[in-house]
Image: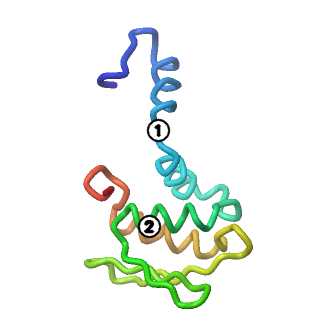
Amino acid sequence: MGDADTGLGSGYDEALEMLYVSEQDRLLLRILRGTSDANIPFDSLCRLLRRLAFNERIRGSHHIFTKEGIEEILNLQPKGRQAKPYQVKQVRRVILKYRLGGPTDVS
C-alpha cells in the first residue's frame, strides 16, 4: 500500500488510508457507487467537475460543463442544495465512459 503501510494489517492500513482521502475523492466514490444520487450536494458536484478540468459556463441557474475530448455537454441545475439524481447519473456515465478521475485527470 505504499507509504502508509504500517505493518499492522490490511484493515488498519485501509482505515488509515481513508483518513488521507480528500473530500472530493470521497464524493467521486459516492458518485461512482450510485447508491446516493439524491444526496449529492450541487456545489460539491460542480467543484468536482471543475477539478476534473471541465470548463463551466453559467446561464441563470444552469451550470453548463464542457471539456475538450468529451462529446457530452453536462447541463446541471440544482434542486435546492442538492444535485438532481438524473444529472448525477449523467455525470457518472461520463466519468466512466471517459475513465475520468484518475491521477492524470485531477488538477
Q: Secondary structure at mark 1?
A: loop
Sequence-earlier tag: 2 or 1: 1
Q: Which mark is residue 21?
A: 1
Q: Position of residue 62 (x, y in %)?
A: 57, 85
Residue visible at 65% across and 63% down in the picture: 37
Residue visible at 52% across and 84% down in the picture: 75
Q: Position of residue 57 (x, y in %)?
A: 44, 84
Quadrant of the snapshot with the N terminus: top left
Closest to the observer, 15 or 34? 15
Q: Which mark is residue 81?
A: none
Give residue 79's quadrant in the image. Answer: bottom right
Q: Secondary structure at mark 2?
A: helix
Q: Could you tell me the amino acid type at mark 1?
A: Val
Q: Are marks 2 and 1 in contact (CB under 8 Å)?
A: no
Quadrant of the snapshot with the C terminus: bottom left
Closest to the observer, 66 or 33? 66
Residue 74 lies left or right of residue 34; in this view the side is: left
Furthest-bottom residue in view? 59
- Within 10 Å of disc 2 (Cα), the crowding (few <14, some 14-19, many 20+) is many
- Within 10 Å of disc 1 (Cα), the crowding (few <14, some 14-19, many 20+) is few
Separation of disc 2 and disc 1 at Cα?
17 Å
Q: Which residue is denoted by mark 2 in the rendering?
A: 49
Residue 81 lies left or right of residue 73; in this view the side is: right
Residue visible at 68% across and 67% down in the picture: 82
Looking at the image, residue 68 lies above or below residue 42: below
Looking at the image, residue 43 lies above or below residue 28: below
Q: How is the image coloured?
A: rainbow
Q: Could you tell me the amino acid type at mark 2?
A: Leu
Q: Position of residue 96 (x, y in %)?
A: 41, 63
Closest to the observer, 23 or 36? 23
Residue visible at 55% across and 58% down in the picture: 31
Furthest-right residue in view? 80
